Image (cartoon, rainbow, N blue to C red):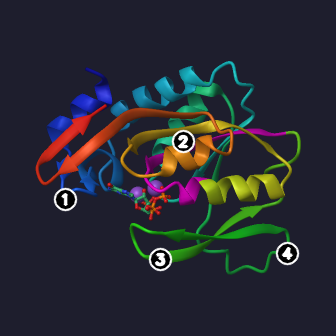
Amino acid sequence: MKLLEEKILAEGKAVNENILKVDSFINHQVDPMLMEQLGAELASHFKDSGVTKVVTIESSGIAPALMTAKALGVPMIILKKEPSKVLNENLFQTVVTSYTKGTSYELTLSQDFISEADHVLIIDDFLANGEAATGAIRLLHKANATIAGLGVLIEKSFQPGRQKLEAQGIDVYALARIARLEKDLIEFY
Ligand code: G4P
Ligand code: NA
Ligand code: NA
């Protein structure tokens, strides 16, 4: 069994049929040694894709994205959910709606850090409905960058994220794919 799957079985908790709690190593406390290994696995999948930058969405995507970027030897960029209070005209923005949380936010990227020369790998902790990743792709396209793929730690395969992204031609790679959740039960693909 794979490293992340073992950790999920050991420490993850299925709250109900929709939500997997992984607060002890991803969302609240972070296990840096594990994260470094997972980042290396993500980097290894995309190593021949010509990635120039890794992009993530704050906040829980930052840890895996940083480790992936380090393994690839490229910079990491954090898409913000709240624009800086400091006046800045040079921003790309797009609205993202989260079905899991029932909220919307304005995803923001400075024009200074991405250009048409970039081939971007998007990294996040979870892939659920795919709205965050789709928003990130919209922003990167505004910057005329191209997309190398999407790498996530955990995909909830019973939700439509992967299909939505593959329909846009995106290479989706997940380290753990969850087929089914039920209170206190976790099933992988
Ligand atoms: P989507 O982007 O795939 O459409 O996902 P969705 O809007 O449904 O998810 C919204 C937030 O909920 C995201 O975090 C996502 O990582 C998180 N999430 C979705 N499903 C799960 C789950 O089963 N377990 C856990 N722990 N989180 C889940 P966020 O709002 O961007 O916040 P942050 O954690 O990155 O700060
Ligand atoms: Na996230
Ligand atoms: Na999250």
User: Which element carries disc 2, helix, strand or loop?
Assistant: helix
Asked if residue 112 shows in the view, the reply is no
Using a 10 Å C-alpha cutoff, classify the residue at mark 1 as few (fewer than 14 neighbours), some (14 to 19) or many (20 or more): few
Q: Mark 3 near ligand 1 (CB under 8 Å)?
A: yes
Of mark 4 and mark 1, the one earlier in the sequence is: 1
Cα–Cα gap, marks 3 and 2? 23 Å
In what quadrant of the picture does the N terminus appear? top left
Q: Give the range drawn in magenta.
A: 118-133
Furthest residue in direction left, as rendered: 184
- Residue 103 disc label: 3
Asked if residue 36 shows in the view, the reply is yes
Residue 182 placed where, x, y %? 17, 51
In what quadrant of the picture does the C terminus appear? top left
Cα–Cα gap, marks 1 and 3? 20 Å
The residue that disc 1 covers is 16
Is 120 located above or below residue 19 in the figure? above
Q: Nearer the viewer, residue 108 or 126?
A: 126
Number of the front mark, 4 or 1: 1
- At x 31%, y 40%, the residue is 178
Number of the front mark, 1 or 3: 1
* Tag 2: amino acid: Ala
Q: Mark 4 near ligand 1 (CB under 8 Å)?
A: no
Where is ligand 1, by quadrant? bottom left
The residue that disc 4 covers is 89
Cα–Cα gap, marks 3 and 4? 25 Å
Which quarter of the figure has residue 46? top right
Q: Which of 52 and 143 is in front in this view?
A: 143
The residue that disc 2 covers is 65
Cα–Cα gap, marks 2 and 4? 27 Å
Which quarter of the figure has residue 153? top left
Of mark 2 and mark 4, the one earlier in the sequence is: 2
